[in-house]
Image: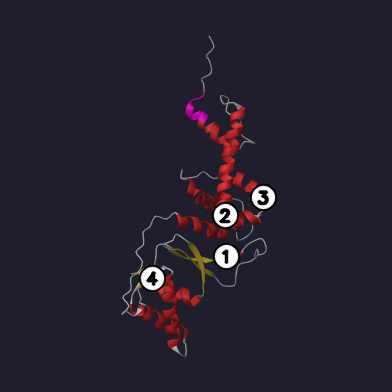
């Protein structure tokens, strides 16, 4: 008596189902699911993933042709196995794909940095950290107070001017010097990017190292061999005051 073939288990069907959704051109439709239904699932699944990535990386989407874009999204779905079920983490998974799974030979040389720059806005918008704004007594000199950057303010460093990239500007080589940006979220949940120069970057780093503004400014003046240190001190005061207004700094 011939033995009947064992029907596929539910888990086997799930794996077949997922494999087909990821790579419908090369994976078979599961035997026990109607092809018409699978076509609907395939379209919904792809459109959800593609739409979320396109919305999360709008500049990247703008500068890549339709054919190359859809090829990349399909490649992401085939090659990268996401480590989280959270939908808002797809952007992070897409960056991991660009860094670890993708053959970048034909991509713009700045693709990973641009993707990170665009991801930061979403990452900050969903961050749960609660921040107490710095309350300064009017009799206190802000240069005598120790501050640090808020958890909702992220200093960023890139090799390309990612904040300028768009359809009309796509660099084909790295910048001569690092591009320093600061992204922050204020109490109105508005996300803003600032470009920093080397002096303001140094000031932020010294503040985060625990120095009060006066000592940080004097350190910078010494490093610059500035002929008039008071100019540097006044500049530091203006920067710290602006950063406090923007809620970039909190008490250390």
Q: Secondary structure at mark 4?
A: helix
Which residue in the structure is indicated by mark 2? 57
Q: Secondary structure at mark 2?
A: loop
Cβ–Cβ under 8 Å for marks 1 and 3: no
Sequence order check, earlier mark of 3 and 2: 2
Determine crowd level at label 1: few under 14, some 14-19, many 20+ residues with C-alpha closer than 10 A.
Answer: some
Which residue in the structure is indicated by mark 1? 163
* Label placed on residue 143: none
Q: Secondary structure at mark 3?
A: helix
Give above or below for 169 relative to 79: below
Which residue in the structure is indicated by mark 4? 208
Q: Is 130 in the magenta?
A: no
Camera-near label (1 vs 3) is 1
* Residue sitting at x 32%, y 78%: 138
Determine crowd level at label 2: few under 14, some 14-19, many 20+ residues with C-alpha closer than 10 A.
Answer: many
What is the distance, in whole Å, between disc 4 and disc 3 at their CAs? 42 Å
The answer, for residue 101, to whether it is visible in the render is no
Sequence order check, earlier mark of 4 and 2: 2
What is the distance, in whole Å, between disc 4 and disc 2 at their CAs? 30 Å
Q: Main secondary structure of the magenta part?
A: helix
Cβ–Cβ under 8 Å for marks 4 and 1: no
């Amino acid at each position: 008596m011939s033995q009947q073939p064992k029907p596929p288990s539910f888990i086997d069907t799930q794996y077949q189902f997922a494999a087909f959704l990821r790579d419908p051109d090369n994976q078979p439709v599961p035997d026990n699911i109607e092809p018409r239904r699978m076509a609907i699932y395939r379209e919904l699944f792809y459109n959800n993933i593609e739409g979320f990535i396109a919305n999360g990386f709008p500049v990247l989407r703008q500068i890549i042709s339709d054919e190359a874009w859809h090829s990349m999204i399909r490649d992401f779905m085939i090659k990268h196995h996401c480590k989280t079920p959270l939908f808002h983490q797809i952007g992070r998974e897409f960056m991991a794909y660009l860094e670890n799974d993708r053959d970048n030979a034909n991509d713009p040389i700045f693709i990973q940095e641009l993707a990170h720059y665009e991801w930061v806005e979403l990452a900050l918008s969903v961050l749960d950290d609660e921040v107490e704004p710095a309350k300064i007594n009017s009799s206190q000199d802000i240069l005598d107070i120790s501050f640090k950057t808020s958890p909702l303010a992220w200093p960023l460093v890139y090799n390309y001017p990612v904040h300028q990239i768009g359809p009309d500007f796509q660099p084909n080589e790295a910048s001569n010097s690092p591009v320093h940006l600061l992204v922050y979220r204020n109490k109105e949940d508005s996300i803003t990017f600032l470009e920093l120069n080397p002096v303001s970057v140094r000031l932020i780093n010294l503040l985060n190292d625990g120095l009060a503004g006066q000592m940080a400014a004097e350190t910078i003046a010494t490093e610059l061999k500035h002929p008039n240190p008071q100019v540097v001190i006044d500049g530091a005061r203006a920067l710290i005051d602006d950063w406090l207004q923007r809620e970039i700094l909190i008490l250390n």
